[in-house]
Image (tube, rainbow, N blue to C red):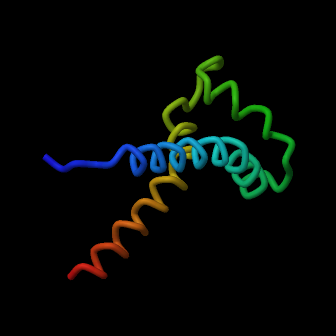
Amino acid sequence: MVHIEGRTLAKEWLFFLGMLVLSAVVMPGIIAFLFHGTLAPWGTFYPVLFGLQNGEFFAAWLIVIAPYLLVQFIRITCWAIMHV
């Protein structure tokens, strides 16, 4: 089993939570602007995200978590290239 220091684990959790909050704030605006050309539909994202409205619940969460997953994919790819 791999031993992970508490400090490293705490740093990764803070990074995850920070990216999650940042994505939840920034991504709805980006999506609204790209698909509608305005920020007007921004308010329709959060009821779907928190399940208060029927709709694309899982798609909304995928939009929120996608930037974090992209950053992790880039990190692991760089790590793999450096350790080959």
Residue toward you, 23 or 81? 81
Image coordinates of residue 35 in percent, x first then y, are 72, 54
Q: Position of residue 11 (x, y in %)?
A: 48, 49
Residue 4 relative to residue 15: left or right: left
Q: Residue at x 55, y 32 (%)?
A: 56
Instruction: Give the residue at the far left of this rendering.
Output: 1
Q: In x, y percent, where is residue 37?
A: 82, 56
| Relative height, residue 71 to residue 77 (above, below) | above
Q: Can you say which quadrant of the picture contains the C terminus?
A: bottom left
Q: Residue 4, position in %: x, y? A: 28, 49
Pick whichever, 34 or 15, lies toward us: 15
Which residue: 86% across, 52% down? 38
- How many numbered discs, if any? 0
The quadrant where residue 42 appears: top right
Residue 84, above or below 64: below
* Farthest top residue in view: 52
- Identify the residue at image location x=72%, y=43%: 25
